[in-house]
């Protein structure tokens, strides 16, 4: 059984990505590790797995190199294509606005990329723009944080206890389809000041995706892991913290990523409708003041901020769930 | 059974309090559902595992072996009867009964060492001490080099070794194993069986082992119980008088073969009975000529 892969690996020159290093670290030592215990009573059995081949080392190294070269090549291709697609978009924008294209769509009022870039330079110099960005980030920060704490906390409880689920889910299902923007008028009436009501809208946007994904994540935790935890002496709170939460974590992060996107949509809408300050307000105000370059600057700022926030979530997910890299889809543990 | 048990050395420091780890299953019945849809999984099972004894239960698939183990583990409450561990009734899962599951049950988000430490952590054992215990146990299982790996980086046999070591970390009095090697390939299985007997002799705990592999049951056990097709009852009890430590060569000995034939015969009757319940009488006609009288009667 050990001779077969020996011949297979070298002949199959272009071994693909992470397989060769893992095979080398996973398979080999198991062969050298097992006999340690077996050796005394059954030397005969220690035979077959204990044949460590010197050959696969070289083959594996070559495989790793090939995989690395291929990875770099793929990355380079992706980078070039990415630059191309962005460049083409800016070029189109530049041509359309510089030559004031006008067919059914009218580009004649739109600012050119250069004007927007100059506007950015000006905006960075005055504190108003920075203040607007800061306000939006603060609202997202607070609304999203509250949504995370409540959504994950409630999601864990609802996902784990059937009675609680039956009690709360009908109410949640009734509120969920109402988009966060539809909450704007009520929110203004509900909360004492404008600032809190905008944060509330942001919270509403993020809350439901986080809650529902957490519930689904908890319900998908493998029952055998819960049993394993119980028979190792974990009581309910420990089980919740050490087994249910980490077991649901991948899906909780999915909820956070979706929730972050919806939170931005809701925030910008709320700022445009009822706001003072914030990037959404800045963009809408620019429209009212016929400051076209600022509109596009606002749009791009919103996009960049949203991108940054979801990057943060992805980074947090990678940092919190390093094990996920190794898990094969569908198989847990 | 007693010959094999007596042959083992004095109890170690872990068991200084005297012989512990006795499992008594008393008139245990387990049924699911009510009325017409009621299924009797286990019926009136009496079974005792002496302290330090290795007992296997074999039977056709669906005979309620796993149900029985789940009751002993405390995951299910019996419909009738009870399970006593050292005289105290079992009411729920607990760390004094280590369980090794059929599926891999390691926490994928914890490193191998953290998995092994889990039970001790739940008991509030200090970090340095549980780390030491985990490393000692992993060393015994030849897995120390993998202490910082995640379970998904290990092979099936290694995962199951970690599972055994994790169950042993809290120094349980009994180890309950539900077809732990069922998902492994034949070679790995043989190695794992050897590792398990070594571990068992080192830790001197009682083991209740569920399997459908007859040779595995003989190789490992002091006594083997055969269960009937559903509803699962104890059909036979066979002491395995093979000396210990057991080696692979014993598996071709006359004694081993004799027990193997005996158990195979008992199991075949039950497997056919189980199939006979599922299929209509005509479905098994071709087989009927080959089987003993009990099987034929069940089918035709």
Image (cartoon, coloured by chain):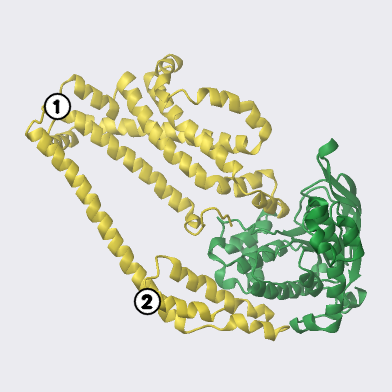
Chain colours: A yellow, B green
Pointers 2 and 1 in contact (C-beta within 8 Å) = no
Instruction: Give residue A65's quadrant in the image.
Output: bottom left
Quarter placement of the C terminus of chain B: bottom right
Quadrant of the snapshot with the N terminus of chain B:
bottom right
**Between B44 and A161, the one nearer to me in the picture:** B44
In the image, B295 versus B197, the foreground residue is B295
The residue positioned 45% from the left and 40% from the top of the image is A256
Q: Looking at the picture, tell me which residue is in the foreground, B190 or B70.
A: B190
Q: Position of residue A286 (x, y in %)?
A: 20, 24
Q: Chain of mark 2?
A: A
Q: Which residue reaches farthest top?
A: A189
Rendered image quadrant of residue B162? bottom right
Residue at mark 2 to residue at mark 1: CA–CA distance: 57 Å
Name which quarter of the figure residue A102 lies in: top left
Q: Is residue A170 visible?
A: yes
Neighbours of disc 1 within 10 Å: few (<14), some (14-19), many (20+): few
Q: Which residue is mark 2?
A: A62
Under circle 2, the secondary element is helix
Q: Residue A106 has which mark? A: 1
Crowding at mark 2 (Cα within 10 Å: few <14, some 14-19, many 20+): some
Q: Horizontal and vertical percent for residue B190?
A: 70, 75
On the image, the x and y values in percent for residue A70 come to 32, 66
User: Against A232, is A36 above or below?
Assistant: below
Residue found at x 43% / y 13%: A189
Whole-percent x, y for residue B123 in the image: 70, 54
Chain letter for mark 1, please. Answer: A
């Amino acid at each position: 059984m050990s001779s077969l892969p020996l011949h297979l690996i070298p002949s199959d020159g272009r071994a693909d990505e992470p397989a060769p290093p893992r095979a080398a670290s996973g398979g080999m030592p198991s062969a050298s590790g097992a006999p340690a215990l077996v050796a005394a009573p059954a030397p005969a059995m220690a035979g077959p797995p204990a044949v460590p081949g010197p050959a696969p080392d070289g083959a594996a190294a070559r495989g790793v190199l090939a995989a690395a070269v291929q990875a770099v090549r793929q990355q380079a291709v992706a980078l070039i294509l990415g630059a191309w697609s962005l460049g083409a978009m800016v070029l189109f924008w530049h041509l359309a606005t510089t030559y004031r294209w006008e067919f059914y769509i009218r580009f004649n009022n739109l600012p050119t990329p250069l004007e927007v870039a100059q506007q950015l330079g000006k905006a960075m110099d005055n504190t108003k723009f920075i203040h607007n960005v800061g306000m939006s980030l603060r609202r997202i920060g607070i609304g999203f944080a509250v949504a995370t704490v409540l959504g994950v906390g409630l999601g864990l409880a609802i996902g784990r206890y059937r009675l609680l689920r039956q009690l709360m889910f009908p109410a949640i299902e009734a509120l969920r389809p109402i988009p966060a923007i539809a909450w704007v008028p009520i929110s203004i009436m509900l909360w004492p000041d404008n600032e809190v009501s905008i944060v509330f809208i942001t919270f509403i946007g993020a809350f439901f995706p986080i809650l529902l994904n957490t519930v689904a994540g908890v319900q998908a935790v493998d029952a055998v892991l819960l049993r394993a935890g119980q028979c190792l002496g974990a009581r309910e709170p420990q089980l919740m913290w050490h087994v249910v939460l980490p077991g649901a974590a991948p899906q909780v992060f999915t909820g956070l990523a979706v929730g972050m996107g919806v939170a931005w949509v809701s925030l910008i809408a709320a700022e445009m409708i009822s706001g003072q300050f914030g990037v959404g307000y800045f963009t809408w105000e620019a429209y009212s003041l016929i400051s076209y370059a600022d509109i596009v600057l606002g749009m791009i700022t919103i996009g960049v901020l949203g991108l940054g926030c979801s990057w943060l979530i992805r980074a947090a997910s990678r940092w919190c769930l390093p094990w996920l890299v190794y898990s094969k889809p569908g198989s847990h543990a | 059974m007693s010959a094999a048990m007596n042959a083992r050395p004095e109890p170690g420091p872990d068991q200084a309090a005297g012989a512990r780890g006795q499992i008594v299953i008393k008139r245990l019945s387990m049924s699911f559902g009510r009325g017409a849809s009621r299924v009797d999984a286990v019926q009136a099972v009496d079974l005792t595992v002496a302290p330090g004894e290795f007992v296997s239960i074999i039977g056709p698939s669906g005979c309620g072996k796993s149900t029985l183990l789940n009751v002993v583990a405390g995951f299910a409450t019996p419909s009738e009867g009870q399970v006593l561990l050292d005289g105290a009734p079992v009411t729920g899962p607990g760390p004094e009964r280590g369980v090794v599951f059929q599926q891999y049950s390691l926490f994928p988000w914890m490193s191998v060492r953290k998995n092994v430490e889990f039970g001790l952590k739940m008991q509030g054992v200090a970090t340095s001490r549980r780390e030491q215990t985990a490393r000692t146990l992993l060393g015994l299982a030849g897995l120390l080099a993998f202490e910082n790996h995640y379970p998904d980086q290990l092979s099936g046999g290694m995962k199951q070794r970690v599972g055994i070591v994790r169950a042993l970390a809290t120094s349980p009095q009994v180890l309950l194993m539900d077809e732990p090697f069922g998902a492994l390939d034949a070679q790995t299985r043989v190695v794992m069986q050897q590792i398990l007997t070594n571990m068992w002799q080192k830790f001197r705990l009682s083991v209740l082992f569920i399997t459908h592999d007859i040779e595995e049951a003989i190789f490992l056990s002091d006594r083997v119980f055969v269960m009937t097709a559903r509803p699962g009852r104890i059909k036979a009890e066979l002491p395995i008088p093979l000396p210990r430590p057991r080696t692979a060569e014993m598996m071709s000995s006359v004694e081993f073969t004799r027990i193997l034939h005996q158990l195979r015969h008992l199991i075949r009757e039950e497997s056919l009975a189980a199939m006979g319940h599922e299929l209509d009488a005509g479905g098994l006609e071709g087989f009927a000529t080959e089987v003993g009288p009990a099987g034929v009667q069940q089918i035709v």
